[in-house]
Image (cartoon, grey):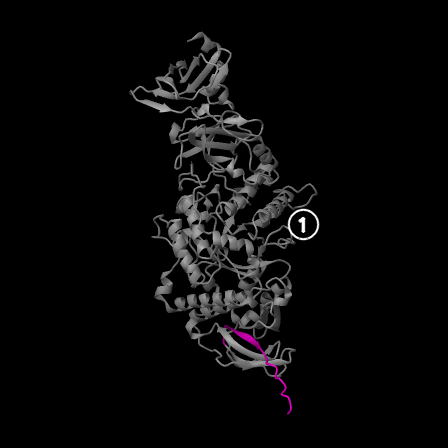
Amino acid sequence: MGGLLEKNVNWEKIEGIVYSDTKYPFEVLGPQLTKDGLRICCFYPDATGVVVKEKKGSHTYEMERLDDAGVFGVMIDTDKVFAYTYQVYYADGSVWEQEDTYAFFPELSQEDLSLFTQGIHYEIYKVLGAHKKKINGVEGVQFAVWAPNATKVSVVGDFNLWDGRRHIMEMHSESGVFTLFIPGLTNGDIYKYEIRMKGGATVLKADPYGTCAQKRPDNASVIFDITNYKWNDKKYMAARKKNDPLAGPMNIYEVHLGSWKRPSDGDGDFYNYRELAVELAAYVKQMNYTHVELLPVMEHPFDGSWGYQVTGYYAPTSRFGTPEDFMYFMDYMHQNGIGVILDWVPAHFPKDAFGLACFDGTCLYEHADKRQGEHPHWGTLIYNYGRPQVSNFLIANALYWVEQFHADGIRMDAVASMLYLDYGKNDGEWVANCYGGKENLEAIELLKHLNSIMHKRNKNILMIAEESTAWPMVTGKVEDSGLGFNLKWNMGWMNDFLSYMKTDPLFRKHCHGCITFSMMYAYSERFLLVFSHDEVVHGKGSLINKMPGEYEHKFANLRTAYMFMNGHPGKKFLFMGQDFAQFAEWNEAKSLDWNLIEEYDMHKKFNNFCRDLNQLYTTEPSLYEQDFVPEGFEWMSCMDADRSIVSFVRRAKDSDDMLLFVCNFTPVLYEKFVQAVPLPGKYKEIFNSDAEKYGGANYVNTRQLTAKKVPCDGRDYSIEFTLPPLGTTVFRFKKAETKKKTEKK
């Protein structure tokens, strides 16, 4: 061995490379200027020899083997670092020319690290993760991962035979962020991080910020540059900035992409995002929905979790294609005027070994104390919301889906489990906050922070909370001590109303309050009325099967239920399959029963009913303009429990734009029903759930009615008409014309 080389080699640090146990590989590998010249070292465990080759010039420098494991080095008589490649020789006679990873010190700014450490780097996904870059004219991928308690982190993949010694990452200062630039890698290359924990054990982890992942059951991260897609939704996005979504109709169709439609059942095949976009957009437009809400599309290993056990927060699931395919899906929806809301899961994460759990050998993303860090009934882990880098991971992730994938809203799953430290736990299974209470102060701060920054950066984006308790001001402004959401799921209304509808009509009079109580709190929050996937799984049956009675009665019950829902204040939400009355409970492993529409007349008519009801809702300002103020709703009759009949008026901002709903929840026909009305004038039936075209008995009212001065329910005027059994009818009000006085000649 050359004397100068031996003199300039630190054997202890070389052992750190050989045994893959160092945080600072650049101290050994790559070019190093010394007082004796330029030292270059590399690690090729399978090579028989390595030569340094100048890029600009003809000189080559044969390297000496410094260690039997495969460390090579050379001293070159120069005081400058020059551009070079390695010629690597192998026993089979092959020679490979390669760039030196360690000739490119990864770029990472102190400002980025500082903002991340403070928890306020809202585009941290552009720094951490795997990103294509060009350094000194050489293309490759820069990796960065936060693992502050690791003793060593390597990038491993097919490109280095999953050998953690070959691409050891450099830790930057005390931030806990490890980085490395690897020349030559590109889209499609798979990788993981090999993390050595204190004590010497190693684990393989997927990239928390990876933009793509392998299709399950494989779980490595996949390099994918998401910056190349050319969007075509500029017109839609410009309109979105101008228009408050809460001011207009909002009729959301909830979709699980894996089971909405499938090319075949039982064999694991799925349609691509692009194929789904075309078919789904056509159906949504045909049915007059305004938005779709997707069950989580973030990468998850288990189909049966429906996406709620997320392992790849920054990666659209590969079940349906690439990130660009998903961008096409979003783009296509927007070009068809359809908003897209994404389910998002910040409340918990699974324990899969390749995921976030015990990421760097410590409870990095979760709490170490199981009383704080686990959901015992879900078998999942709880984020440590008080750790700035963890809250940054989550806040930036919500922003990522809005700003990079053009999502129109985020529906936050299981907010109640975040707000309460004792959620789903028994005594002794949780730890009180610093004031002795059960409120999760750190989660509350995260929610406020996220909603504030989301609305500051992205105008008119919807933030929706699935929150099932009486927590106050979920949709209140953050500056007024609210949580800052735009909408809250009205779980109370849903539970009460379904309980009422499941009751035999003969006994509904005993639970009449279930359909009237919601108006006692209707304006305490901005509510979204929901019949979600949760109501049609786990033995609960489909909505049509919850309805009592024989075949025709089930359909009549469900039609009048949907009529009541569409008349009730609040935005609207329905899970797929319930708009053609699928009898089977939802099964994520198979397609919806679309054949019902084709083969059975009643299902076809019910589907048409939902289509027309959605059109009524989206085209009548009285049904959406004043959802959140008392002026938009008025009971006409809510006390007729014996007959199980309710009636109410919905008003637009123009108070003369008014619709009257009369709902009969029993199978009794009233041929001369007297109904109180708010004002004198004309009343024209514009919708009747009992119409023959919808599968009803056709007890409809074709003639325009004139209100008569006949007192009813405390009102001076009333109308008389046929009220169908298990039916709802809607009348449009027309103001009485004022007669002009004629002048006497």
The reply, left or right, for residue 277 in relation to residue 115 is left
In percent of the image, x 64 and y 41: which residue is there?
Answer: 431
In percent of the image, x 46 and y 66: which residue is there?
Answer: 610
Image coordinates of residue 677 in percent, x first then y, are 60, 77
In percent of the image, x 57 and y 81: which residue is there?
Answer: 719
Q: Does residue 706 show up?
A: yes
Is residue 738 covered in magenta?
yes
Among all residues in the image, which is located at the extreme front?
745
Image coordinates of residue 571 in percent, x first then y, are 55, 60
Local secondary structure at mark 1: helix
Residue bearing the label numbered 1: 479
Region rendered in magenta: 724-745
Among all residues in the image, which is located at the extreme right?
435
Type of amino acid at the residue the image marks with label 1: Glu
- The part of the image, by quadrant, that contains residue 695 is bottom left
Looking at the picture, tell me which residue is in the foreground, 508 or 365.
365
Rate crowding at label 1 as few (under 14), some (14 to 19) or many (20 or more) other CA atoms within 10 Å: few
Q: Name the quarter where the N terminus is drawn.
A: top left
* Residue 457 versus residue 96 in the image, above or below: below
Q: Does residue 368 show up?
A: no
- The part of the image, by quadrant, that contains residue 247 is bottom right
